[in-house]
Image (spheres, grey):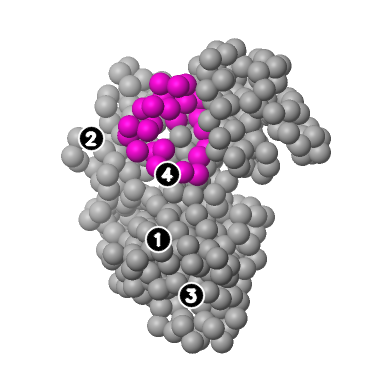
Amino acid sequence: MKIIIAGDGEVGFHLAKLLTDEHHDITVVDPHSDLLKMIESNTDLMTIAGDSTCISVLERASVKRADLLISVVHDENVNLITSIIGKKLGAKKTIARINNTEYLEPAKKELFRSLGVDHLVCPERLAAEEIVSLLEQSAATETFEFSKGKLLLFMIKLDENAQVIGKTLDQIAGEFPYLDFRAVAIHRNGKTIIPRGKDQFLINDLTYVVTKPDGIKTLLELGGKEQFQINSVMVVGGGRIGRKTCRRLQNTHNIKLIEIDKQRTIDLSEELENVLIINGDARDINLMQNEDIDRMDAFIAVTDSSETNILTCLHARKFGVRKTIALVENIDYIDISQNIGIDTVINKKLITASYIARFTMQSEIASNKMLHGIDAEVFEFIVKPDSPITQKQIRKLDFPQDALIGGITRGNESFIAVGNFKIKEGDRVIVFSLPSVIQKVDRFFR
């Protein structure tokens, strides 16, 4: 696929690197020549220095041959103009990053589509939705819902309380022959393993599991976890993510929002009627104690500083907060953060890349999620007529070793994947895949 990415920093660079791993023909357009030199020295990408709203720049990038034009600069107006001009110049499909969630209303989306913007992505809104989902599934470190909740992805960090420690998948299957869940990946010592029958679970494993709703209770018992009710929440950072998160939660939870900027605090107090807003620095331990941090069920740090978010979450853990969520924009910090006691890390680059990646596949994808802290992705494929995946039982498919089918939904029913299951047209299939085989997996669903 011929893809043009218009960016002005790390989001565009990360997206380009991700898609290069999947063997697309990528051209990066960016106004910063220094960044482009770094990209050229680390990749084989074609780069063009310039303004993506300039017709001559897009023509140099061969926009008329582009299958996909993605604009993810920080200014949403530039993204919208780039997409509109690019579509008029011949790009088959366009995606624009936006900040204004008003544009996501159905009528507004249709307006932009008529102008040439096929899809809109708002990273801050996606991040807020992920935070809300994590509070609903309090025992999970990471979670994602497929087919309106018929199947779910859970990530659980195993500790000494987990009943599965030292056991293989075959042993667990023998003890519990009718499990409503399946382990699809284990992340251990910086390496991701697609588990097979003889693989054992060890302490500190990050274990990814696809489960039916009925399997959640047993899954958590075996993982040594328990769901708990989250009522009181402290949010640090009143930027776009913090504001959107509070807006979603303010009528169902008791929320305190701490914001260091005085003017922003005033603005937030006018917008969020049911949130207690405090002007202060969350790194001040005395302030946090005065605001009853030890009585909070969850702590969410989403300031512009990854270091502040990590530090304040660690302080919250020290005061006994059971659920901590940190926005960590430096990807190099994610693995460290997960290993020093922070429950959940979210990253806007990964969230944005997850949303966009589905448009680079030839198969039909209902949803997908790029996982934080590990180099892997989960897809929900919609099975087309006569696609290779329908030809044989799962056990007889020559499915890639670095990918695994976790579950299937068919109408109102959901199934955990087993060897003798035969996938049919119209099924929705959950697949966990490492980057090296994503294109091979894609071929099974074309």
The answer to whether residue 108 is magenta is yes
| Circle 1/circle 3 CB separation < 8 Å | no
Residue sitting at 58 percent across and 37 percent down?
A: 72
Q: Does 310 sit above or below residue 319?
A: above
The percent coordinates of residue 80 (x first, y second) are 53, 30
Q: Nearer the viewer, residue 404 or 61?
A: 61
Residue density around tag 2, few if under 14, some if 14–19, many if 20 or more, within 10 Å: some
Q: Which mark is residue 278?
A: 3
The percent coordinates of residue 385 (x first, y second) are 30, 18
Q: Secondary structure at mark 1?
A: helix
Residue sitting at 54 percent across and 49 percent down?
A: 348
Residue sitting at 29 percent across and 59 percent down?
A: 216
| Circle 3/circle 2 CB separation < 8 Å | no
Looking at the picture, which amino acid does disc 2 mark? Answer: Arg
Give left or right: position of 130 versus 334.
left
- Report how far apart the C-alphas of labels 3 and 4 lie in the structure: 25 Å
Residue density around tag 1, few if under 14, some if 14–19, many if 20 or more, within 10 Å: few
